[in-house]
Amino acid sequence: MPRGVKKAHLPEKPCACCGRPFTWRKKWEKVWDEVRFCSDRCRAEARRSREAANRGTRP
């Protein structure tokens, strides 16, 4: 008999970059509150856009 929690009952939150919902993963168990992006691609895109904004404000 399977143990654990069904995928439908796992916590979920939206990605800070693309807005798509993503669900909790075991590897994020201890840092779930800090996880903001659904993928490496979204994390890199957010970093690129943040760096571009910083470059625009410098003389």
Image (spheres, rainbow, N blue to C red):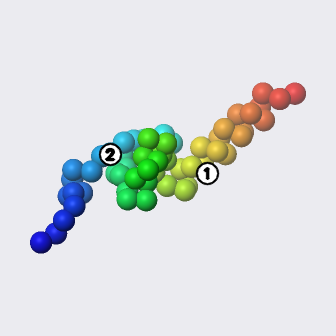
Q: Residue at x 35, y 52 (%)?
A: 24
Front tag of 2 and 1: 2
Residue 50 lies left or right of residue 26; in this view the side is right
Among the two numbered marks 2 and 1 on one chain, the one whose residue lies closer to the N terminus: 2
Using a 10 Å C-alpha cutoff, classify the residue at mark 2 as few (fewer than 14 neighbours), some (14 to 19) or many (20 or more): few
Above or below, comparing residue 34 to residue 2 in the picture = above
Residue 52 lies left or right of residue 42; in this view the side is right
Residue type, mark 1 in image: Ala
Using a 10 Å C-alpha cutoff, classify the residue at mark 1 as few (fewer than 14 neighbours), some (14 to 19) or many (20 or more): few
Label 1 element class: helix
Nearer the observer, 53 or 12: 12
Extreme front residue here? 30
**Residue 1 image offset from top left, x and y in percent:** 12, 72
The residue wearing badge 1 is: 44
Tag on residue 26? none
Residue type, mark 2 in image: Glu
Q: Quadrant of residue 19?
A: top left
Residue 9 is at least partly visible in this image: yes
**Residue 38 image offset from top left, x and y in percent:** 45, 51
**Residue 47 image offset from top left, x and y in percent:** 64, 45
Residue 33 lies left or right of residue 2; in this view the side is right
Residue 51 lies left or right of residue 2; in this view the side is right
In the rendered structure, are the residues bearing label 2 and label 1 in contact, judged by CB atoms less than 8 Å apart?
no
The residue wearing badge 2 is: 12
Label 2 element class: strand
Q: Residue at x 70, y 34 (%)?
A: 53
Q: Residue at x 16, y 69 (%)?
A: 2
**Residue 42 image offset from top left, x and y in percent:** 53, 50
Q: Residue at x 55, y 56 (%)?
A: 40
Count how many numbered circles sit on residues in the image. 2
Measure the C-alpha gap from mark 2 to mark 1. 21 Å
